[in-house]
Amino acid sequence: MTVQTECKSLSKMGEIRSRPCQSCYICGTDGDPLYQCLKDRYWGAPGQWNLKKCRDNSCGLAWLDPMPIQEDIAKAYQDYYTHWDAPSGTPGQGLMRRFFRSVKAAYLGHKYGYGRKGPKSYLGLLAYLAPLRRAASDFSVMYLQFLPGGSLLEVGCGSGEMLKGLADLGWQAEGVDFDTAAVESCKRKGLNVRVGFLEHQQYPANYYDVVTMSHLIEHVHEPLELLIECHRILKPDGRLSLVTPNINSAGHRIYGSSWFHLDPPRHLHIFSVASLKVLLQKAGFRSMKTRTTIRDAAGAYIGSRSIRRTGRHKFGSRQPRSVHMWGHAMTTFEWAWLNLNDQVGEEIAVVAKK
C-alpha cells in the first residue's frame, strides 16, 4: 500500500492525514530514524508518528516523518491547553510569596530595567542564589530589556498569560493566535489580540520594536516563512525573542522516546541550537544571543517520568510532594550539567536582532 493510499484510508477513519518528509527542512540532508510509532501522550490525537534526525551533526534538526498535513493539523489541538485560563492565584497570601515577588521585581529591575531602581533593587541580587527561580523570571520577560513605550507582538499568545504580564510591565503589547478559544480568553483579559496566522494579518512593515514567540516555532510547517514575516514587521534594530524545546537537552538524553517535549503530532520540528541559528540567519537576522535554559525543567522531568511509566501524562494532574521534590532535584542536576555544557538546557532561548 502506498503512502498516499494509506493516508486516504486513514482519513476515512477520522485520522490525521500526513505526507512523507524524508529530508531536513533546513539543510536538505536525509534523516536517520530516531523513534518510531510514537503516539500522542497528552490529548489523544489519532495516529502513530515517526521522528527522524538530520544526519548532518552540525545541523541536528529532528522532525516528523510522515508529517501531518496543514489541513488536518487542527485535529491535534481540539483539547489543547491553550483553551484554558490559568487558575487564578491569591496574590496577597503568605509572607514568603510576597517576599519572592519582591525579589523577582527587584531582579527584573536590576537586570532588565523594569520598574524604578532604588535601594530595594539590590534585593534582586538574591535571585542569583536561586537559579531555578531566576530562570523562570528571565522567561517571564522573554529575556528582553525594557523599552519604555515599546511596541510588542506575541505570536502564538495562547490564553494570554505572558502577554498580560508584559503589558502590565509597560509594553504596548498585542497578540495573534490561530486558536479561537485562546483568543477569546485573551479578550476577556482586555488584551488586543487577533485570531489567525501571522502571515495572514498584513501587519505593516517596520512596525514593532519586539516580536516574541514562546513554544510556537516547533508547531509550524514552514518556520522559515514565519521568521521572514517576523523580520519584515520588525523595526530596524528590532528584536525577535523566541523559546523552543532543545533536542539536545539533558531531559531528552535521559528519557529518549519518553521525553516530554517530543509531543507528537504537534511538534513538527524540534531544533538544536545550531539548526535554529541557521534558520534565523536565512530569515535575515544579523545578530543573536542564544542560550539553553532550565526553565520549567522540573515539569518536563515529571511529564517524562509519567510517559515512561504509563505511556501518558495528564496536564495539570496533582503529583505527590515526593515527585515534585524529585523534579526539582533533576532540575538542579541539569543546572549543574549546564554549567559544564551550555547545550543541555531543556529549552533554547534566542534574542535576535534585525
Image (cartoon, rainbow, N blue to C red):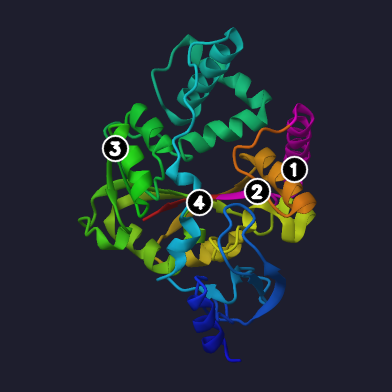
Alpha carbon distance from label 4 to label 3? 21 Å
Foreground residue, 287 or 343? 343
- Element type where label 1 sits in the image: helix
Label whose residue precedes the other's in the sequence (2 or 4): 4
Give x and y (percent) for residue 326.
79, 34
Alpha carbon distance from label 2 to label 1? 9 Å
Q: Crowdedness of circle 4 by 10 Å Cα count: few (<14), some, many (20+)?
A: some
Q: Nearer the viewer, mark 2 or mark 4?
A: 4
Mark 4 sits on what residue?
Answer: 215
Q: Is residue 62 visible?
A: yes
Choose top left, top right, bottom left or bottom right for residue 267. bottom right
Q: Which mark is residue 346?
A: 2
Foreground residue, 92 or 242? 92
Give x and y (percent) for residue 45.
55, 61
Q: Name the residue at the top extreme.
A: 95
Q: Is residue 218 left or right of residue 33?
A: left
- Element type where label 3 sits in the image: helix
Alpha carbon distance from label 3 to label 1? 38 Å
Q: Crowdedness of circle 2 by 10 Å Cα count: few (<14), some, many (20+)?
A: many
Choose top left, top right, bottom left or bottom right for residue 56. bottom right
The boundaries of the magenta stretch are: 320-348
